[in-house]
Image: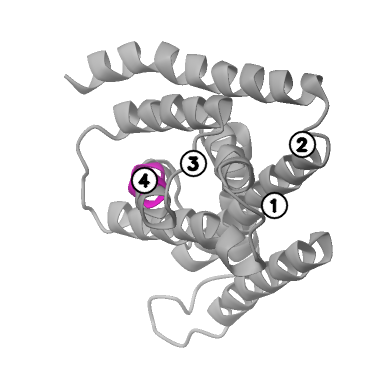
Amino acid sequence: MTSKLIRRTTVACLSALASTAACAHLTSDASAHLHSADLTASFAQGLLHPLTGLDHLAAMVCVGLWSVLGATQARSGYTLWRQPTAFALTMLLGTCLSRAGMSLPGVEPMIAASLLIFGLLIAARAHLSQTWGTTLVAGFALFHGAAHGQELGGHIVATLGGLLMSTVGLHVAGIYLGQRIQEHQHVPASRWITRLAGMGVAAMGLAAMGPALAASL
């Protein structure tokens, strides 16, 4: 399973790099002045952005972790990646919409709510159907993407390439952690660690909810 995850991550990373490389060959007048340094800076900005915000980092790791711990049985590579893929793609959609000028209401409260819900789901190892689980993850991802779009600048394709690579990497980290926990689920300590981690993320979301609601009013 680990080798499959590595291959999927490699494909996603190569796709992001290919998108970035393609930008260097744009021929329109608007992009003719772009230099490789501009693309590199934009790519690096997108790559680092989820890693510098604890809320985004925690949410992305949680999605990967819950895709394993929330499964009622061992999942194939396709079903295992359904929720992380939904998060990544919907997040990119939200980022593009935000960069295009579309404003979603309650972005920060929804990000806080995502941490609260994801944390509780992990702590309880709650099982949802694939449809409901994917819908929930994608809904929250749209708001995470909107926040990225408000904060990120630079060349959009290069920025999205870096953002996608970082997101996939954090999902892989969550999936790997979940698989290791599952391998040792017979050890009582592993369940307590999962519960404590989930409650910690939920507490983070709850603590952020008040200020986020106050700022949005």
> Hey, what amino acid is under mark 3?
His
> Hey, what amino acid is under mark 2?
Ile
Give the Cα distance between marks 3 and 4.
13 Å
Please name the residue that numbered disc 4 is placed on.
136
Secondary structure found at label 1: helix
Picture quadrant where residue 69 is located: top right
Picture quadrant where residue 89 is located: bottom left
Q: What label does residue 181 carry, if any?
A: 2
Locate residue 175, reporting x and y percent.
Answer: 69, 48
Locate residue 143, reporting x and y percent.
Answer: 34, 43
Q: Which sits earlier in the primary sequence, circle 3 or circle 4?
A: 3
Locate residue 108, reporting x and y percent.
Answer: 33, 29
Please name the residue that numbered disc 1 is placed on.
172
Residue range of the region highlighted in magenta in the rendering: 136-146
Name the residue at 71% across, 18% down. Answer: 192
Q: Main secondary structure of the magenta part?
A: helix
Residue count near mark 3 (Cα–Cα under 10 Å), binned few <14, some 14–19, many ≥20:
some
Name the residue at 50% across, 35% down. Answer: 126
Task: Give the foreground label among 4 and 2.
Answer: 2
Task: Give the foreground label among 1 and 2.
Answer: 2
Q: Which of 53/12 is in front?
A: 12
Q: Which sits earlier in the primary sequence, circle 1 or circle 3?
A: 3
Please name the residue that numbered disc 3 is placed on.
127
